[in-house]
Image (spheres, rainbow, N blue to C red):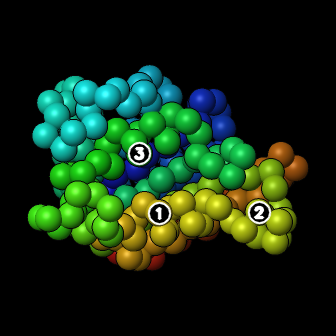
Amino acid sequence: MMVLIILAHPDPHSFNHAIANAASHALRQDGHHVLLHDLYQEQFDPILQKEEIPIDAPLPAVIAAHGRELQQADGILIVHPNWWGQPPAILKGWIDRVIRPGIAYRFLEHDSGEGVPIGLLKARAALIFNTSNTSAEREQNIFGDPLENIWKRCIFDLCGIHSVQRRMFETIITSSPEQRRKWLDDVRLLCRETFPA
């Protein structure tokens, strides 16, 4: 199985990086082929230019390559912090530029884009790991858990991936090394459950 990992955090010493590394190692141990993109380290350009919007637009080589990898992935894993109830801008730009019509979804022949898209991704499952400094209770009760809606309903469900799990680790800023080690054990276990060998 090929698993695509997209990591979006600017600090290479962050817990997000520890999550991505633990996930990548566990998946490789289980025999999976892993493609890991650290968007900040790669200096991914998040700006969608108007020339890229048409479905048949010629794409920059890096965007075309990301699109091919997304299409080929049997599983998708996203790692990012919760910033203002959203992914970081660099990851939002990756979504805008890579999860595009003709790659991740299409519309019916006579639909001009106002209908419900038909998912094209072949991945069987997606797993999202978030970090947050907001408690899960506050996130749900006050904000309505916007990341759950973004990833499950607004992105992956519309792209044909209906098995979507998300795990938020909180509260990062006050967590102990022992708590983080336990969380990384949870990451490995969730990876193995979501993407079985």
The answer to whether the residues at label 2 and label 3 have Cβ atoms under 8 Å apart is no
User: Mark number for residue 154?
Assistant: 1
| Whole-percent x, y for residue 188 in the image | 52, 64
Q: Quadrant of the C terminus?
A: bottom left
SS at circle 1: helix
In this rendering, position of residue 146 left or right of residue 26: right
Q: What's the distance in space between the residues labelled 3 and 1, CA to CA?
A: 11 Å
User: Observer-nearest residue: 113 or 104?
Assistant: 113
Q: Is residue 138 above or below residue 177?
A: below
User: Mark number for residue 95?
Assistant: 3
Q: What's the distance in space between the residues labelled 2 and 1, CA to CA?
A: 17 Å
User: Observer-nearest residue: 51 or 67?
Assistant: 51
SS at circle 3: helix
User: Mark number for residue 143?
Assistant: 2
| Whole-percent x, y for residue 70 in the image | 27, 51
Q: Is residue 103 visible?
A: yes
Q: Is residue 121 above or below residue 193?
A: above
User: Observer-nearest residue: 98 or 7?
Assistant: 98
The answer to whether the residues at label 2 and label 1 have Cβ atoms under 8 Å apart is no
Q: Tag 1: residue type?
A: Cys
Q: Give the mark nearer the N terminus: 3 vs 1.
A: 3
Residue located 39% across and 70% down the image: 157
